Each structure stands twice: as C-alpha cells, then as structure tokens.
Image: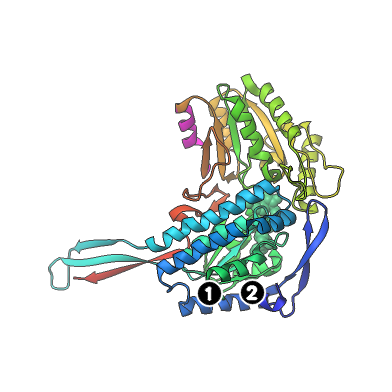
Amino acid sequence: MPLDQIGADAPAAVIPVFDPATAEQIAEVPDVGPRAVDAAVARARATFESGVWREMLPKHRAKVLWRVAEIVDRRIDEIVEVEARNNGMARWLARNLIASAAEVFRYYAGWVTKIHGQSTDIMAEGGISGANARYHAYTLKEPVGVAGLIIPWNGPFYGAMVKLAPALAAGCSCVLKPAEETPLTSLMLPEILAEAGVPDGVVNIITGYGETTGAALARHPDVDKIAFTGSTETGKLIVQAAAGNLKRVTLELGGKTPVLIYDDADLSKAVPGAGLGIFINAGQGCVCGSRLYVQRGVYDQVVEGLANFGKAMKLGGSDDPEAQVGPIISQRQLQRVSNLVEEGRVQGAEVVSGGRILDRPGYFFEPTVVTNVRPDMRMMQEEIFGPVIAVIPFDDEEEVIAEANNSTYGLAAGVWTREIARAHRLAKRLEAGTVWLNAQLAWDVSQPFGGYKQSGWGYEYGWEGLNAYLKTKTVYAEI
Ligand code: NAI
Ligand code: MG
C-alpha cells in the first residue's frame, strides 16, 4: 500500500517483515507514527459523524458484510498464500482460519438487522400532580463511535476480521493496527472492504510498532474504544493509556490453559486432543493447553503418547503443503521459548521429548514434552507461547483443582473424563472463561469468548461481542 494511503508522510521508521520459516525479509512497512494515527482517527471520526456507514439502511449494511465474506472466500487462495508466508503457520491452519473469518462476517451480517433495545412501562409514586407517574421507558443501542483495533501476530487475518465484523455490524468506524510482525494480510483489507461496499474512510489500516503507533492509538483522545488482543503486559499499558479519555476497553489476553486427564478418560481422544491442543500453530495460541494434569494411573501412558504425538508432527514452512506445524513467529519469540525450557531444565525439569531449536533456517522449535516441573518455575507461571507442554501427575481432585486454578490467567481449561457428573462439576470449579469437556480448541462465533482473572476484560463473539461495540441509552417518556 502506498505511504500516502496509510497517511504516513514521514514515517519514523521502516519495519522489516520476515518469513519466519526462512528468516528472509519479504517486505517492509512503515511505522506510521502519531501524526498518521491522528489522520486515521480523523478520517474514522468524519465518516462516523457523517453517518455514511452507521446510518446506512441495516439491510444494506448487512449485505455489505455478507459480501466481504464472499470476497474472502473467492480470494482465499491468495490470502492463505500471504498469511502462511508472513506468519509461518501451516497452510491447512491458515485456510481454516481464513474460512472461519468469512463465517464471522456472515454471522455478524445476520445481527445487523436485529440490533434493538427493550421497552418497559413504568409506574412510580409521586408524579407532579400527586398521582402515580407513568412512563414509557425504552433503550436505544448506539454504536460506540471510533474503535481502535489492535491485533497480534498469531492469527493475523482472523484476528483482524473478528474485531472488524462486530465493529462494523454495530456501525462503528475503525482504525486497525496489525502486529508489526504480520501486517501483510491486513493490507489486503482496504481492497476487499472497498469492493464489498464499505465506504472509504470507515476502516483505516495503520502499520507500526506497538510502543509508537499502537500506543498513540490507545491514548488518542478521539478514540472511543480500544479492542485489543495480545499480552497481559501490553493489555495493562492499554488500560493506562485509555484513562486519558476513559475510552472503553476490551481485552483478550494471555492464558495458561490447564488440561486434566482422568484415569477413566478415552485416551484415544484425550492424548491427540491434548497434543494438538498445545502443538497447533507451534503453541502460539492464547488457549493452547500448556499445563497437563494427568491422574496417576494413566500418567506414564499419556507422557509416552504425547511424546510420540509431538515427534510424529511434520514441521515445515509455507512452501511445504504437508507441514502440520510451522515455525515460531520471530527470533525474539524463539529465544524466549528456548530460554524458558532451558531455565526449567537447569531447575530440574526433565525434557522427555523435543526441547531444541531445529538445525535449519527459520525459527523452528521441536514439539516439547516436559515433566518434573514445579509450580514456581517460570514455565509454569508465564505464558510460553511455544510448542511446550508440562505434564504433572495428580491423585486427588481437590488438589488438582487448586493447582489448575493456581494461575494469574483464566482463559480456558479442559477436562477429559468419562464420568459425566465429574465433568460438569469441574466445569463449575475451574476458573476460566471457556471450559472444554472431552474436547479442546472447540470454538464457535455464536458463543461468547472472554477471560477470567488477568486473561481479559469483556467478551468477543456472539451477542456479547457485538454489544461490546454498542452503548445503551435509556429514554423515559411520561405518558
Ligand atoms: P504484544 O501484546 O506486545 O503485541 C500485540 C499487539 O499489541 C501488537 O499489534 C503490538 O504492536 C501492540 N502493542 C505492543 N505494545 C503496545 C502498546 N504499548 N500500546 C499499544 N499497542 C501495543 O505481544 P508481543 O510482544 O508480540 O508478544 C509477547 C507475548 O505476548 C507472547 O509471548 C505471548 O505470551 C503474548 N501474546 C498473546 C497473544 C494472545 O493471543 N493472547 C497474542 C500475541 C502475544
Ligand atoms: Mg510486546
């Protein structure tokens, strides 16, 4: 995209973009900086105030969103190509995620014609005449205004679309900043949105580093809301930056998903479930199950099964259509994953399988199974965001619940057992916004998704996800 379209007349810096499977530079984009953020916010504000989008007939707005989905489906090969190259994720996963992104637009297209408030008749004592007062009260749902969308690199196109769809359905205008590592599929969006009929200036894409461009968006006084996905650390900075004008904030942050496998579980499903649940996308998913608690009777069998599952996975770059798992996103993240494993090893953890950086170009790390861990190790406390699973034996239910909940995070949790009552009991006891019973990684745009504890604020998906881009006004009319 030309610089003048991004609005960067004098970008502060140029960001190199890499193929993480080869470590080769494939593109560069500007770090547009605060002035271009001002310009993008001003464009979003102008389109919002003009009503060109939020006042469009709902049935037409719905059709525009539906058309976005159709264009994404039509261009999916091209988007997969760019996404897999820029992010490194396996092609099958890129295709799944991009097809899901189109479905998210279809889902929210359906909501556009169903946004409305509620009405109530109210009677209260002490009207002006001394008689009871009667009111007809009703609520109006209105778009929050200009929404800043800050996206991470682990599912770039999907991540952008999941925020854009409800924001646009609500009638907001947007400024979207993709992660500095993965801007390329977001830069395809202006063409896709224009072809679908989203008016010019309603969605403004800006590229840049978090500390410069992202921070300028988060603190901008004319932005009404920030929707953020990323690290808990950056989430806290965004909350601080938002304090200036008390903009609304929704946060989808890190996780340390505990998974429990009981003796009675169907191991033919639980082992591959737990394996894919961590190794998918090289462990770079906020809901990846990085802590696995296994009841003593099946512990050895599960450790061995997981190690074999990890060893059998085919690693490769976007040029390898057979690859099941790609590389880590960057040298920085690869080093972080490797350091956490090394630190654990020095403190007594046993690396049962994997544990090494692959001896080839790119940022590949082996699927890794670790045992002998202690709750105080950094790899048990912090999000690793790599293909590393710690396996811990347990005997007693109360003990394992306490350990599973012993985390500052609370995004997701999983339980594998054949005992129905136990499964539902644990669903209530585990402190997480999503609980999987005899499943992992299940998600659907119709169901709310949000974090307990330091895993987030608010919800995405479903009605809650749309409501996060709406404000409620209450009107009382005396009758
Ligand atoms: P990050 O949270 O710093 O970056 C995510 C997005 O926020 C990017 O677009 C970045 O440019 C932006 N950003 C960074 N600092 C900002 C600031 N001060 N103001 C506004 N925007 C800012 O994540 P990072 O540094 O790439 O990864 C570090 C760790 O974060 C990972 O190891 C992982 O544990 C976690 N993470 C979690 C994700 C999730 O899906 N929940 C996604 C990405 C990272
Ligand atoms: Mg960061």
Q: Horizontally, is 407 left or right of 378 in the view?
A: left
Q: Please, is residue 279 above or below residue 131 in the view?
A: above
Magenta highlight on residue 250: no
Residue at point 42%, 63% (across, down)? 112
Q: Secondary structure at mark 1?
A: loop
In the rendered structure, which amino acid carries the disc numbered 2?
Val
Secondary structure category for the residue under label 2 = helix
The answer to whether residue 142 shows anywhere in this view is no
Contact (Cβ within 8 Å) of mark 1 with mark 2 = no
Q: Position of residue 263 (x, y in %)?
A: 58, 22
Residue 85: x and y in percent read: 74, 55
The amino acid marked with disc number 1 is: Pro
Q: Is residue 423 magenta?
A: yes
* Mark 1 sits near ligand 1, with its Cβ under 8 Å away: no
Look at the image and tell me in which quarter the C terminus lies: bottom left
- The residue stretch that appears in magenta: 421-432
Kindly identify which residue carries mark 1. 199
- Left or right for 348, reference 435: right
Q: Residue at x 71, y 59 (%)?
A: 182
Q: Quarter holding the N terminus?
A: bottom right
Question: Closer to us: mark 1 or mark 2?
Answer: 1
- The residue carrying pointer 2 sits among few (fewer than 14), some (14 to 19) or many (20 or more) residues within 10 Å by Cα, namely many
Number of marks drawn: 2
On the picture, is 424 further left or further right than 377?
A: left
Q: Quadrant location of residue 388?
A: top right
